[in-house]
Image: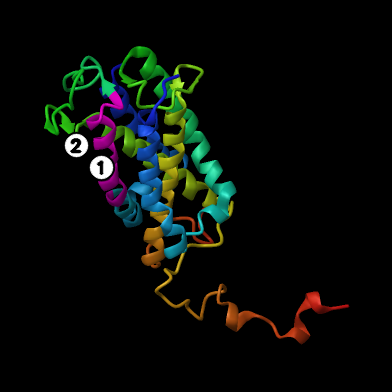
Amino acid sequence: MMSGVGQYSYVAILVFVMAGCLWLEVVLRTRVFRRWLRLILAIAPALILFAIWDVYAIAQGHWWFDEELILGIHLPGELPLDEVLFFVAIPVASILTLEAVRSVKDHWRVGDEAGEGRR
Amino acid sequence: MTYTQLAVVSVLVVVAADLWLLRTRMVTRAVFWTSYAIVVFFQLITNGMFTGFGVVRYDGAAILGETSPEVGPPPFIGEWRIAFAPVEDLMFGFALILLTIALWVFWGRRGVQRTPVAGPPIWRRRSGTTARSVTTTRPSPATRPDDAP
């Protein structure tokens, strides 16, 4: 494992992402984290599918990471822990953004309103 | 398969899932495209950081453009790159974002934590007609069931 501040480069970018979206939960009252079970159920399948893609791409050499700029903790399949955090951060940011938009545009249909989806 | 092929297939598969498997039809909704426009703006910034600083590099055999250079950033724009990142990353990101949002709405449609709903923003007053209006719907102490002995 490498040492030095450089190894937090990847995570620092994720912190930038979270800083850009977490305030929506308070200011736009998105209430995403209060719906934590639904959040987990939305994130988990995408996380698994994209982690599999990531492992394949790393094995095929489609992309690779600068070991000095990531945490240095690898999961099976040479998957950096940083990448798993990415597949949590980006979906959380996306769902927060969706709920923030509907918070402002409360007349726009999303498809999960009461009475929808039960046919 | 190359990254280019996988990226195109992932977009097609996720759009198909949104329309016909999950039946969330997010790609037909203004709320999705507005959200995506916001997310993709930030994605270009973060992609630019990941690839501009060389946190991640790409093999020219797997993408439309050239292999990332050993030293220094790839082209900012051009040679199939946008903000240093291969165009394939935009398709990868689109698939990830659409799948996540479609799944979120899918579970809501199935009744999983449909509530509490989002909004209103803190600068807007709560509408008096919604069930969430605390001041108008709270029962008087005499009729509140949990006050019963």
Q: Quadrant of the N terminus of chain A?
A: top left
Q: Are marks 2 and 1 in contact (CB under 8 Å)?
A: yes
A48 relative to A38, above or below: above
Name the residue carrying label 1: B45
Name the residue carrying label 2: B83
Q: Quadrant of residue A62?
A: top left
Q: Is residue A60 left or right of residue B21?
A: left
Please name the residue shown 48% across and 43% down the image. Answer: B103
Q: Is residue B107 left or right of residue B58?
A: right
Q: Does the segment drawn in magenta span residue B65?
A: no
Q: Nearer the viewer, residue A31 or B98?
A: A31
Whether residue A109 is visible here, answered yes or no, is no
Residue B102 image position (x, y, % from top left): 43, 45
Q: Are marks 2 and 1 on the same chain?
A: yes
Residue A97 image position (x, y, % from top left): 38, 53
Kind of residue indicated by mark 1: Ile
Q: Which residues are magenta?
A: B37-56
